[in-house]
Image: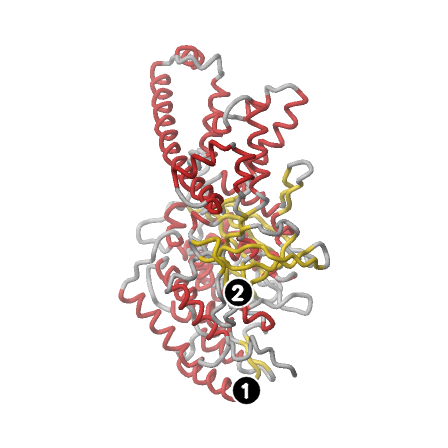
Amino acid sequence: MLVNEKTNGLTNDLINEIVNRHRKEGKLGTEIMMRVDKIVSQPRNRYLYICQLLQPGEYSDEMINPWTDELWTVGFFENGIYNLGDILVGSYGLQKNEKNLDQLIRPIASTLVKLDHPSELVDKYGEEFVEFLHKKFGGEEELIGLMYKRFVETAEKEIKEQEELKRNILKQIEQLSKEIDEKNKNFNKLVEDIKLEEQTKEDLEIQFMEIKRMFGLEEPEAHNTQEAFHVLEKDEDFFRAVQRGLYHINGENFVYEYDIVKRFIASLRTDQLVLLTGPSGTGKSSLVHQIGEVLHPCKVHHIAVQSNWTDVQDLLGFFNPLKNTYMPTPFLQALVDARNDKNSLHIICLDEMNLAHVEYYFSSLLSAREKFPEKRFLDLYAYKFYREAMLDLEELIGKSFAEITRTDVEILDYIKRKDAREKYELLWDYPAHFLIPKNVRFVGTLNMDETVKPLSPKVIDRSFIIELDHPSKLSHVREELEKHPINKKIEMDINEFIQPALEEPQLTVEQAVVIDTVQDWTAALHGIPNAAMNSRGIMHMKRYLSSLDTVEGVAEEIVNSKVLPRILFSKNETFLQTSFENFITKLPEGGSARRKAEKMNTGKRVVQYWR
């Protein structure tokens, strides 16, 4: 076998060491900048882009590969959207492809952004704007694209200040409305007094709603005054109440163990991808559906995964550049519903999630969810189409985008109205950069048979996995639930519910001991691939603990959901077998984690969670 001299001796650990050293020395930043030097056509309208890495802050200087001492060249595959000489900025990861180890890093194609060339900015905005960028940010001619990027970031900050101004105006208008009600004055008379050009009360309310939607302000929830809700007492166990509700509300009589309900609710609060597994008939989909019936305010969206899903378009839909419209899927529409209903918890359930490769169609979500909640954007299409639609709509209406309401669209003549509706829908519902709402949670149900795809370590690492047992084995639980009925939906505070996912967890001494215990147990798994808890797993543990009031049994819950699903090795590997058996002896006798680990160890050829 021929040996590639450039990659001979390279390992993942060595690559990690080289890249980290360059980061510390300031030779690599959190993002990379590169120039497209070569484009190679590939099958199915794809292209291999070969790029030259450029110095951080010195974007005209090429970087030297510390391994080969040659110019640092990297490559990535993408559709034909870039040209020779384009300057690209985006995120990167460590190189995993054995053929390309000498590149050390690999660009993440979904994050790449092309910097505008000075001539493009002149064409779009004129020479005065380009001069303005020079004066505001300074720099050389070739950095003008980076100046423009900084200008956009500065403009976003100013927009936030305008948002606060909008909020104050809305508060003043709300106060005026209260005074009108108290004095029993005619609303149209007020419109005339404040010179709103004969706008009706209904139109004004629509405009308020659209402005609030634009700036992410919460709408007051419309409670059904005829419906009463179960409000938890101070010392009442929330998880126990939900368990009772699952059984009694709507007469469904669903039986779930307390431990399962607790793990499911707590993992939802921490905003992990929750995967429900178990034999057919154990009530995986029913658990998600019934949670929506038990909790208030809570809405569940069921999405059936298809076996032919291969990329993110199957999940999110696609943009039609010919019509400048977006074709959404039920999944994306569920995200839109959650964004427009911030006072409710929205659970999106992907039924039979592993009928297709999860890491293929769910890749954008997996990547976005690694970021802070306020930065979890999905790129639905190129931003230039969004801007073109905004400019066209402003020209049609004769107002700035921030002032346009649905009423403005509907009063246009027939020919203009159709075009304006499509652009208005694109801008409001399907923006180019779609922010994943903080009040949405993702759940997947899994089947384990010959028709499904195995889960990759990447998916398992980012998930909280819960195994359900058949209800026929839970007669003792049913008897206890019969004694304590609950017939009303359980009222919850949505902001309190999602809080563990939004803040840095502050653990008590007892909670910190749980993490130490899990790490002590898993230390015995050394050598078993992917079994060790990484920094992401430790953060998941902390958030999970922060959502609970007690630590009793939590260490085993974490082992069941975060550790055991990672384990997969052949029983012929005696060293790994010994490590796993030592791990089993560390687990509490008679506990659920030990029972599951011992069951995994009964496999004839392989030790694995998925049986």
Q: Tell me, yes or no, if residue 53 can be seen here.
A: yes
Horizontally, residue 78 falls left or right of residue 167, namely right
Q: Quadrant of the C terminus?
A: bottom right
The residue drawn where x is 55% and y is 83% is 602
Give the camera-side residue of 68 and 450. Answer: 68
Q: Position of residue 478 (x, y in %)?
A: 49, 62
- For the residue carrying disc 1, how many other residues have a C-alpha within 10 Å: few (<14), some (14-19), or many (20+)? few
Q: Which residue is mark 1?
A: 573
Q: Secondary structure at mark 1?
A: loop
* Badge 2 vs badge 1, beta-carbon distance below 8 Å: no
Percent position (x, y) of residue 151? 43, 40
Q: In percent of the image, x 59 and y 48: which residue is there?
A: 331
Q: Quadrant of residue 453?
A: bottom right
Question: Residue at horizontal 57%, vertical 72%?
Answer: 610
Q: Amino acid at mark 2?
A: Leu
Task: Using the image as rendered, state which of residue 43 and residue 294 is in the foreground.
Answer: 43
Judge left or right: residue 488 versus residue 46.
left
Residue 351's x, y, as percent? Answer: 61, 56
**Label of residue 71 in the image:** 2
Q: Locate residue 437, reporting x and y percent.
A: 48, 45
The amino acid pointed to by label 1 is Glu
Mark nearer the N terminus (2 vs 1):
2
